[in-house]
Image (tube, rainbow, N blue to C red):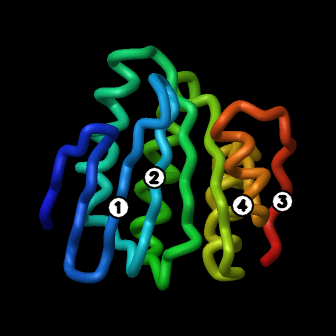
Amino acid sequence: MECTELADGLSIEERLATYRLRRVRPGTIEMILRGGMHDRAVPVATEYLLREIAQVGTLRFFVDTTGIASYTSEFRKLWTAWLSERRAQVPEVHVLVASRLVAMGVQLANIAMGGTINVYSDRRRYEAAIFGSSAQSTVSGS
């Protein structure tokens, strides 16, 4: 696994997967996922998010899953547990989906978290949420 600190975030690269965590502004992080997601890089990504929370108190977390080719159930379970344990610190979770498989996994996580994830299938609405527009989220369905 190769981790690279960037001016605006962190890149985590593995043989078949890439995580790109981008600090949009203080307290707003977008994580862009590409490839086959598994649990190995989750601790590195969550450590980056914890550093942001330590600096600003709460986090608006956006996840672009449109580049995911596959993911393990352990990947989904780790993220669900981490976010569930930090609802007060991460009150906003927004996820952009494209595939039905990923959308189903996000819905499972959303149920486990009490319906607190905003799910988007429209990139424009997702980006409007990141950049402060009042656009409403939509439940996915690609």
Lower sequence index among marks 2 and 3: 2
Residue 29 position in % (x across, y down)? 47, 39
Would you say the residues marked 1 and 2 are in contact, meaning their CB atoms lie under 8 Å apart?
yes
Q: Which residue is mark 1?
A: 19
Residue 16 position in % (x across, y down)? 28, 82
Lower sequence index among marks 4 and 2: 2
Q: Is residue 114 visible?
A: no
Image point (39%, 73%), residue name:
37
Give the quarter of the figure containing the C terminus: bottom right
Q: CA distance from mark 1 to mark 3?
A: 24 Å
Q: Which residue is mark 2?
A: 31
Q: CA distance from mark 4 to mark 2?
A: 14 Å
Q: CA distance from mark 4 to mark 1?
A: 19 Å
Residue type at numbered disc 1? Tyr
Write down the quadrant of residue 2 in the picture. bottom left
Q: Is residue 15 above or below residue 134?
A: below
Q: Which residue is mark 3?
A: 139
Image point (85%, 55%), residue name:
138
**Numbered badge on residue 123:** 4
